[in-house]
Amino acid sequence: MVLAYALSSGLTTGALYALVAVGLVLCYRTTGHMNFSHGELFMIGGFLAYTFHVMLGAPYIPSLLLAVLGTFVLGLVTDRTVYRPLIHAQPLAMVMATVGFSFLLKGIGRHFWGGQGEVVTFPSPVSPAPVWVLGTPVFPQQLLVIAGVAVCMVLLIAFFQFTRAGKSMQATAENPHAAYLVGMRVERIYALTWGTSAALAGVAAVLMAPLTLLTPDVGFILLLKAFAATILGGLGSMAGAIVGGLILGVLEALAGTYIHSSVQEVSAFVIIMVVLVVRPSGLFGARGLRRV
Amino acid sequence: MSTDMDNASRRSLAALLVGRRTVFLLGTLAFAVWPLAFNPYLAYAANLALIYILLAVGLNFIIGFAGQLVFANGALMGIGAYCTGLLMYDGGWPFWLALPAGAVLSCIIGLLVALPALRLQGLYLALGTVAFAQFALWVFIHWEGLTYGNAGFVLPPISFEAIGLGKDLGLYYLSLALVLVFVLIAYRISRSRVGRAFIAVRESEVAAEALAIDLTVYKTIAYGVSALYAGLAGGLFTALLGVVVPESFNLFQIVLQFAMVIIGGLGSIAGAIIGAVALISLQELLRGFQEVQEIAFGALLLATLLFFPGGIAAALKRWVPGWTETHHQDGGGRS
């Protein structure tokens, strides 16, 4: 009973970590850079949905779409202000720049949506009463989260398999120079990548908001979880990010249930450190992109 | 011919007047009379600036010289603060003994962190050290038996009666003396074989190895030195505040200290000093406005990287004679 409850809540949060991590990996594969402001895109997405849904009273679905559109635009802004000017800079400059950008966004989030320690709650669009699945109580919001994440994954796979833009994105990830030479507009693809990556964070934020409390500091916590998921799955591997996210979610829930609730917070850092020391290539052994 | 001579002598005169050595002397003098001339709050702010000079110069070793993207400096500062504080609070040690002990302990912990980190490069190193920094913060908060948790603890009083000064002035002049000594040491290291080896590692690890530079040895030295500076600064920080609480060593330290070395100019000791003084002044001006601080420091860090990648050091090198910092990475990481 306790185990089943831990597993179901672990899989739910794990699915969200996977979604955030997939956005992070998408950006990393195509651009070769890790976006340290990805978590803040998540945070702003959550607060945008809160603004539309709770403060302005818009229905859930339009609020979701507006919030995702908002984070998509924010992703384009990241591309124009951070990535494109520093495209030829060393990784160090890019990491520092995204760290700076993340604090800029965090300050903006704090300015508009409350000070430290203040949290806002987001009502669930579905009934809070649990339903029974295979003898286990499951909250409808959890099912909604898992369904939402699954839909996003299917859409993403379809995007890569069947659309021109998706195929161009894969080609650019493989070799930007070759993609440019065969006539792909690499800069547009980069912009689309940043936007899509941010939009995935936005979807995750809207799905997660009813389950947890929104604070301006939530972004960095989510970023670390997504880092842990990508490192565990193997940096640069999409499937790895999904599996890593799910494993992290379940591990956290189990550690929180059977050891101590404070251990839940620390499991992501421990996973990052242990995987980096023992097997830096992660579970799926995907070698990181090597750009000299 | 004679105009060349005139130009040369004029330049050397200018270098004498506004050169690094003169400005350092004047700066030291200004810091020395500052607490006597201004009120206790301004003296406190100047003391904070002195402590951050140590932190920025230390961080510059690992990021600016050795080129290792490490996020652990705030955590190592916290470890220095906790070691010094706990040795005084629980161990009953006097401050003059607890401070160096805390610095050495955080140096040792920094070296322990370095052991796994030596295998990592670039992004992996950044992610690993971010995780370490958050892990250290978690330990500060949750290991209540040792660290007293979120509430922290109040430091026993520190006395400087042996040298005839009150606590505030004594700590101020101790910080000033330590800053002078450790900045001189930093310059000595940067001009030595070790400093040149750091630069070689930064520019290309493969080329450095081809020059028979042992990556493991020199990276370990860089980690150890920067952890020592951070630990010492942490001990002074704790003495200045009089309390030890985990939230002093949170994520904001990362952006604050990164901004100092980047705005000062990566790889420039003078730049790190100027960056530390400038950003602590800004932080004190914006005291109490957390979101404004976050926006300001984030935007400054970003704007420096975008528009002035060499930082203050590049501007000084260009416009003021006598300010060439040999190890300064002009272009701030642009390849």
Image: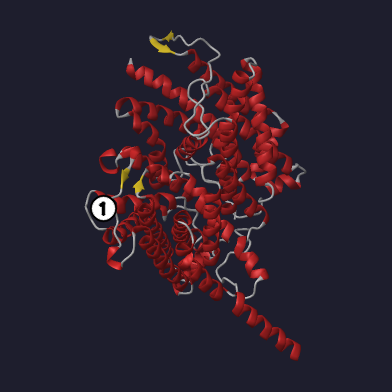
| Quarter occupied by residue B237 | bottom left
Image point (30%, 43%), residue name: B147
Quadrant occupied by the N terminus of chain A? top left
**Residue with the most extreme left position:** B91
Q: Quadrant of residue A29?
A: top right
Total marks shown come to 1
Q: How is the image coloured?
A: secondary structure
**Residue beneath the point at 41% across and 53% down:** B117
**Left or right of residue A172, residue A23 in this image:** left
The picture places residue B197, in percent across and down from the top left corner, at 47, 69
**Snapshot quadrant of residue A60:** top right
User: x and y percent of residue B13 in the render?
Assistant: 64, 82
Front residue of A275/B299: it is: B299
In the rendered image, the vertical position of residue A134 relative to residue B150, given as above or below = above
Q: Which residue is mark 1?
A: B88
Mark 1 nearby-residue class (10 Å; few <14, some 14–19, many ≥20) = many
What secondary structure is found at the residue carrying circle 1?
helix
Task: Judge whether A58 appears above or below A92 on screen.
Answer: above
Q: In this view of the protein, can residue A281 be seen by the observer? A: yes
Q: Depth check: B319 or B240 in front?
A: B240
Q: Position of residue B103 (x, y in %)?
A: 34, 59
Does residue A34 appear anywhere in the picture?
Answer: no
Residue type, label 1: Met
- Quarter of the image containing the C terminus of chain A? bottom right
Q: As drawn, is A178 to the left or to the right of B67? A: right
| Chain holding disc 1 | B
Residue extending furthest toward the bottom = B2
Compared to residue B230, the image places residue A200 above or below, namely above
Query: Residue B259: x percent and y percent?
Result: 55, 53
Instruction: Name the residue nearer the viewer: B109 or B252.
Output: B252
